[in-house]
C-alpha cells in the first residue's frame, strides 16, 4: 500500500473487543457468512452476550467451521439467536441448546433473504490489503450478498485466507468500518473416504456422463467417488456451488479444461471452496477458477445455460413416489436445502442435462441396517426435492429414470435399486399403499 492508504488502514485497526462494542451494540443484526468465519471477532461478541453486556443480538450465517461455543449459549431468545440456513456441527449444537434456529432457503435466494434482513453489521474475514488497498473475501459463498446489504463492515484480516477471482470479491479499505488483525488457520477438510457402495454408485453415474459435460458436485465420499471416476472423461467443465479438492485435481490433470462450456467457457465457476491447503493454493488468484455469489452460481438460467449440465446430489431417503429428503432425520433438521433444488431443476432443463440424486441403498443404525428407499418418508421429514423435479436416482444397485413416470412405474423402478433384502417388503408396502396393483 502507498503511504496515504497505509494511514487510512491503520486508522481503522482496533481490537476485536473494541470493534464489536462499537459496531454490534444491543439489537444488532450481524451477518457472519459461513465456513471459515471471523472466529476471533465473533468470540469477542459472543463473550459479551454471555456476560449479559448486550441483548437482542441476531446472527445470520450458515455452516460455520471451528467451535463457536453455541452449545454454551443457552440464553433467552431476547438476548441472542443465530439464524442459519444450512447447518453444520456448530449449528446443530446451537439448535440443541436453543441458541440457533434454521431458516429454510434455496441458495439462489440468499440475495433476497439478506436484502430482507438488512444486517446492521457484517463481521467477516478478509485477506490483507494488496498494494492498491483492496482486501479479498476469499472463496466464501454468500459473503458478497451479506456485505452488499450490511450498513457497516468489520473485517478480520486473516493472512491465511486465499484471495480469489470473481464478482464482488475485492473491497477497498475505505469501504470498511473497522479492521481486526488476527490470523486464523483455515479448517482443513480432507477429502472423504469412499465406501465400496459409493464407488459403485459413482460407476453408474460416470457411465452416463459424456465428454465435454459441465459438472456440479457436492461434499462427501460419494462426490469424491464420482470425481475420481471422471478421470476417464475429457474436456469437462465446472459450474458448481462447491469446488472440492477432486475438482482441483481434475483441472490440474487437464480432465477439466472448460473448453466446451456454452456459458462462461474457459473457467471453472463455483460459489465456495472447502478442502485441503493444496486446494487453497490452487484457487489463489487462479485465473481459470472464478467464484460467484450464490444468486449467480445457483441461478436457474445460469445453470441451464451450460449444455450437458450434470448435477450430482446426495439424499438421506427417497420414497417410492420419488420424494427426496436430503436434510433431516424425521423432524430433526440436520443440514439444509442448500442448492440441491437449484441444480436439480437447472441441470434437468439444460440441453442434454442430467440430474442425479444418489444414495446408498441402506443406512447402518443402532437397530441394524435400514433401507433408504422407503414406502413413505418418516413423519416430519423434509421434502427437499419434489417428486415432480426428480430425474435420475442412483444406488449401488443401479440408476433409474423417474422423469415423467407414473406412480406404479416409479415404485417398481425404485424397488429395483433398493437393497435386495428390502425389495419384497417394499413391494408389499407399495401394494398396501395403493402404489402398486
Image (cartoon, rainbow, N blue to C red):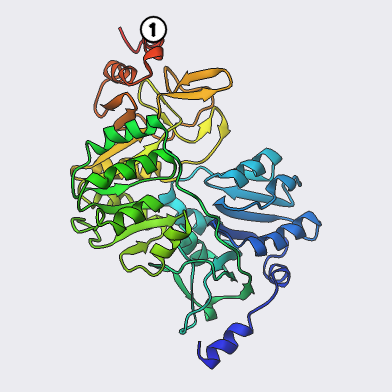
Is 383 left or right of 62, judged from the image as shown?
A: left
Residue 197 can be seen, yes or no: yes
Q: Nearer the viewer, residue 69 or 274?
A: 274
Along the line of sight, which residue is nearer the eye, 426 or 249? 249
Residue 345, located in which quarter of the rendered image?
A: top left
Q: Which residue is mark 1?
A: 428
x and y, in percent, of residue 259 in the image: 19, 59
Residue in the picture at 54% in, 71% down: 159
Residue 248: name its quadrant: bottom left
Left or right placement of residue 377 versus residue 178 in this view: left
In percent of width and height, residue 105 lies at 48, 45
**Residue at the (68%, 65%) spot, across then down:** 24
| Residue neighbourhood size for the residue with mark 1, other residues' Cα within 10 Å, grouped as few (<14), some (14–19), many (≥20) | few
Q: Secondary structure at mark 1?
A: helix
Describe residue 130's horizontal placement relative to residue 251 as left or right. Answer: right
Indicate the position of residue 43 as horizontal and vertical percent values: 69, 59
Quadrant location of the C terminus in the rendered image: top left
Q: Residue 275, position in %: x, y?
A: 46, 53
Whether residue 147 is situated above or below residue 8 in the rendered picture: above
Q: Nearer the viewer, residue 419 or 196?
A: 196
Q: Is residue 152 visible?
A: no
Identify which residue is drawn at 35% across, 26% down.
Answer: 322
Amino acid at each position: 500500500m502507498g503511504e496515504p492508504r497505509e494511514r487510512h488502514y491503520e486508522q481503522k485497526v482496533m481490537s476485536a473487543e473494541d470493534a464489536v462494542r462499537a459496531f454490534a451494540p444491543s439489537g444488532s443484526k450481524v451477518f457472519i457468512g459461513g465456513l471459515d468465519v471471523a472466529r476471533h471477532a465473533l468470540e469477542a461478541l459472543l463473550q459479551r452476550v454471555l456476560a449479559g453486556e448486550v441483548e437482542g443480538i441476531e446472527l445470520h450465517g450458515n455452516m460455520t467451521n471451528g467451535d463457536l461455543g453455541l452449545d454454551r449459549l443457552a440464553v433467552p431468545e431476547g438476548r441472542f439467536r443465530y439464524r442459519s440456513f444450512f447447518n453444520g456441527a456448530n449449528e446443530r449444537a446451537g439448535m440443541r441448546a436453543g441458541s440457533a434456529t434454521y431458516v429454510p432457503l434455496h441458495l439462489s435466494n440468499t440475495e433476497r433473504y439478506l436484502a430482507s434482513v438488512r444486517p446492521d453489521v457484517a463481521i467477516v474475514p478478509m485477506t490483507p490489503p494488496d498494494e492498491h488497498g483492496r482486501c479479498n473475501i476469499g472463496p466464501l459463498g454468500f459473503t458478497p450478498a451479506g456485505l452488499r446489504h450490511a450498513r457497516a463492515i468489520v473485517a478480520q484480516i486473516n493472512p491465511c485466507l486465499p484471495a480469489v477471482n470473481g464478482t464482488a470479491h475485492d473491497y477497498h479499505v475505505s469501504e470498511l468500518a473497522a479492521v481486526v488483525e488476527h490470523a486464523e488457520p483455515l479448517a482443513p477438510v480432507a477429502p472423504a473416504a469412499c465406501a465400496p457402495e459409493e464407488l459403485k454408485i459413482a460407476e453408474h453415474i460416470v457411465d452416463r456422463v459424456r465428454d465435454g459435460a459441465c459438472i456440479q458436485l457436492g461434499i462427501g465420499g460419494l462426490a469424491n467417488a464420482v470425481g475420481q471416476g471422471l478421470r476417464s472423461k475429457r474436456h469437462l467443465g465446472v459450474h458448481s456451488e462447491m469446488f472440492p479438492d477432486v475438482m482441483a485435481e481434475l483441472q490440474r490433470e487437464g480432465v477439466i479444461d472448460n473448453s466446451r462450456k456454452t456459458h462462461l467457457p474457459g473457467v471453472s465457476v463455483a460459489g465456495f471452496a472447502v478442502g485441503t491447503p493444496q486446494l487453497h493454493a490452487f484457487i489463489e488468484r487462479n485465473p481459470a477458477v472464478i467464484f460467484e455469489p450464490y444468486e449467480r452460481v445457483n441461478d436457474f438460467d445460469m445453470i441451464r445455460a451450460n449444455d450437458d449440465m450434470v448435477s450430482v446430489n446426495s439424499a438421506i431417503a427417497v420414497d417410492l413416489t420419488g420424494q427426496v429428503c436430503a436434510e433431516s432425520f424425521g423432524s430433526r433438521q440436520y443440514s439444509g436445502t442448500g442448492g440441491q433444488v437449484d441444480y436439480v431443476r437447472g441441470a434437468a432443463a439444460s440441453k442434454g442435462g442430467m440430474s442425479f440424486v444418489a444414495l446408498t441403498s441402506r443406512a447402518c443404525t443402532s437397530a441394524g441396517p435400514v433401507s433408504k428407499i422407503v414406502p413413505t418418508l418418516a413423519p416430519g421429514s423434509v421434502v427437499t426435492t419434489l417428486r415432480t423435479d426428480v430425474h435420475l436416482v442412483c444406488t449401488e444397485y443401479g440408476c433409474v429414470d423417474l422423469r415423467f413416470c407414473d406412480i406404479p412405474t416409479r415404485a417398481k423402478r425404485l424397488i429395483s435399486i433398493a437393497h435386495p433384502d428390502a425389495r419384497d417388503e417394499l413391494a408389499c408396502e407399495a401394494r398396501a399403499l395403493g402404489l402398486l396393483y
